[in-house]
Amino acid sequence: MRALIDTGVWFRRYHRLPLTGTLEKLLAEEVVEFCLSPISVLEITYKWRHGRLPCPPPEQWLDDALEHYRLLPVDGPIARQAGLWEWSHGDPADRLIAATAAVHELTLVHTDLALKPLTGFAQRYFRGTH
């Protein structure tokens, strides 16, 4: 599977924080291409800067965390798709990440309940981190 890894999954995987066994198995056995949106980098650095993410400063680990991921730029088609979806969910970051998966025909791998009921992109939702 070619996958776009959501922010939380990427962060938790890199920092070896708990993930469900089924999610760990999927990442180890089924994903053949790991992709990431730069929006995930924005989300992590923003949360860290505002004290909402207890971790070392991103400049100490971020480049290493990106090493095995294909970073996909946000471009016009992605922004257009993110804006056109008729979802009640209005989080621009989630919309851009889901649109990146849709435009690049990737499966979004995530643990975000807000994304689970949405349509228009391939997704694999995994319950929390237990």
Image (cartoon, grey):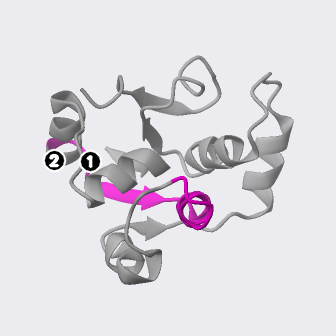
Crowding at mark 1 (Cα within 10 Å: few <14, some 14-19, many 20+): some
Which residue is identified by label 1? 31
As measured in the structure, the alpha-carbon distance from the residue carrying label 2 to the one carrying label 1 is: 7 Å
Q: Position of residue 36 (x, y in %)?
A: 47, 59
State whether residue 47 is above or below residue 80: below
Label 2 amino acid? Ala
Which residue: 54% across, 58% down?
40
The answer to the question of whether label 2 and label 1 lie on touching residues, with beta carbons closer than 8 A, is yes
Question: For the magenta stretch, what is the residue range?
Answer: 29-52
Q: Nearer the viewer, mark 2 or mark 1?
A: 2
Tag of residue 28: 2
User: SS for tag 1?
Assistant: loop
Q: Quadrant of residue 94?
A: top right
State whether residue 125 is above or below residue 50: above
State whether residue 60 is above or below residue 24: below
Crowding at mark 2 (Cα within 10 Å: few <14, some 14-19, many 20+): few
